[in-house]
Amino acid sequence: MKHLVFAAALFGATSVHAETSDRYSKGGAYAPFREALARNSASGELFRIRNTCASNCTLFLGLRNVCVERNARLMFHAGHERDDSTAISAVATQRMLDAYNAGLRQYVQSHGFMDKLTFSTLSGARLIDEFGYKECPKG
């Protein structure tokens, strides 16, 4: 019984102190995301996607301990290289697609999200309800 209480307390503390997508919300160059993804993957701690999460921020969907808040807004587009934001990059686009689960990957491809540089938005609620992403615990 003591182990269950300890585990519940530990999970509660982890969910409250989880890293969030807030500082990555606008997307940006890939290098800082690569570092954050590696750090969060190694820690195994809960990572919350909340509020707006655009472009490379959606890479966090690939973390094993990611959760999504229902009111989050995830914004998708084709990848591009930092030095040329007007040309679609197949490599950068594939990197984003590889981070998504199979259902979401199929959806964004079949609906043209990854064929253009303008944003297409999905709610956190849709990612949870339709694509099976874990909902973040309250608190």
Image (tube, rainbow, N blue to C red):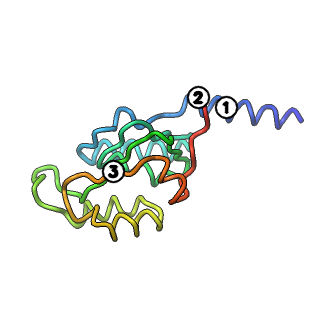
Labels 2, 3: front one: 3
Q: Is residue 16 above or below residue 42?
A: above
In the image, is 2 to the left or to the right of 88? right
Q: Secondary structure at mark 3?
A: strand
Residue at numbered disc 3: 121
Three-letter amino acid code at the position of disc 1: Gly
In percent of width and height, residue 135 lies at 57, 45
State the CA–CA distance, disc 2 to disc 3: 27 Å
- Cα separation, mark 1 vs mark 2, equals 6 Å
Residue drawn at (51%, 59%) of the image? 130
Say which residue appears at 49% left-offset and 39% top-offset.
48
State the separation of the CA atoms marked 3 and 1. Answer: 30 Å
Q: Name the residue tied to disc 1.
A: 12
Q: Residues within 10 Å of mark 3 (few under 14, many from 20)?
A: some
Mark 3 or 1, closer to the camera: 3
- x 36%, y 42%: residue: 53
Asked if labels 2 and 1 touch by Cβ distance under 8 angstroms, the answer is yes
Q: Assess disc 1: are there few (<14), some (14-19) or many (≥20) residues with their C-alpha within 10 Å of its C-alpha.
A: some
Residue that badge 2 annotates: 16
Amino acid type, mark 2 = Val
